[in-house]
Image (tube, rainbow, N blue to C red):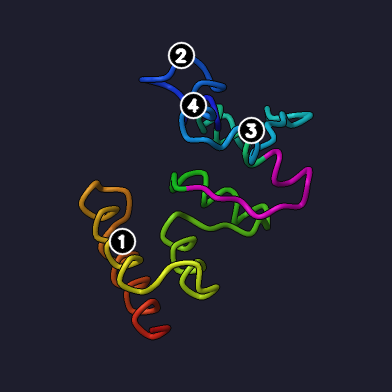
């Protein structure tokens, strides 16, 4: 997963972490096993994330629909970026105005669809 985040403008994963000042917040771990017949249609990052969530009994932050579908089938608790924004509002980490601006930006960039946008916006507005 980190490999996918760092791809592009960063020389390597460490450069990505340092650039965003999060090198002391994350611990990179590889799953013991990430190759299953059920996951062969997924990108390596999604395969590894699903395997690690299963191994460690952790919830999974995932956006790709194929990965989300498989994770649900395997009983993994999942969330996407919009769900994390809603959680941040509920925990009073950010306010509703900022959360709504973030949702609009995600929608504009094609990171969330209209249904997710409307659903999460409604939930944020109810929290305010």
Q: State left or right for residue 35 relative to residue 16.
A: right
- Name the residue beneath numbered marker 1: 103
- Tell me: 29 left or right of 95: right
Label 4 and label 2: CA atoms lie apart by 8 Å
Q: Which residue is mark 2?
A: 11
In this orientation, which residue lies closer to the viewer: 117 or 94? 94
Tag 3 residue: 48
Specify the farthest residue to the top: 11
Q: Position of residue 107 (x, y in %)?
A: 25, 55
Instruction: Confirm whether the magenta stretch covers residue 89.
Output: no
Report which quarter residue 100 is drawn in.
bottom left
Farthest-out residue, left: 108
**Residue marked by disc 4:** 16
What is the C-alpha distance between the residues marked 1 and 2?
30 Å
Residue interval drawn in magenta: 51-62
Q: Secondary structure at mark 1?
A: helix
Q: Quadrant of the C terminus?
A: bottom left
Which quarter of the rendered picture does the N terminus lie within?
top right
Depth check, mark 4 against mark 1: the one in front is: 4
Numbered disc in front, either 3 or 1:
1
Local SS, label 3: helix
Q: Residue at x 57, y 48 (%)?
A: 70
> Callout 3 environment at 10 Å: few (<14), some (14 to 19), or many (20+)?
many
4 or 1: tag closer to the N-terminus: 4
Rendered residue at 29%/71% (across/down):
118
Estimate the spatial distance between the alpha carbons at disc 4 and disc 1, rounded to whole Å.
24 Å
Whichever of labels 4 and 2 marks the residue nearer the N terminus, that label is 2
Q: Position of residue 104 (x, y in %)?
A: 24, 60
Where 67 sits versus 80, above or below? above
For numbered disc 2, what is the local secondary structure? loop
């Amino acid at each position: 997963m980190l490999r996918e985040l760092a791809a592009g403008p960063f020389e390597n994963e460490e450069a990505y972490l340092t650039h965003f000042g999060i090198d002391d917040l994350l611990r990179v771990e590889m799953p013991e096993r990430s190759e299953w017949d059920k996951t062969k249609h997924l990108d390596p990052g999604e395969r590894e994330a699903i395997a690690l969530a299963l191994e460690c009994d952790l919830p999974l932050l995932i956006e790709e629909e194929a990965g989300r579908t498989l994770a649900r089938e395997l009983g993994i608790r999942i969330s996407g970026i919009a769900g994390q924004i809603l959680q941040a509002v509920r925990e009073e980490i950010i306010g509703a105005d900022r959360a709504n601006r973030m949702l609009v930006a995600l929608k504009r960039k094609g990171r969330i669809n209209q249904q997710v946008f409307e659903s999460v916006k409604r939930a944020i507005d109810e929290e305010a």
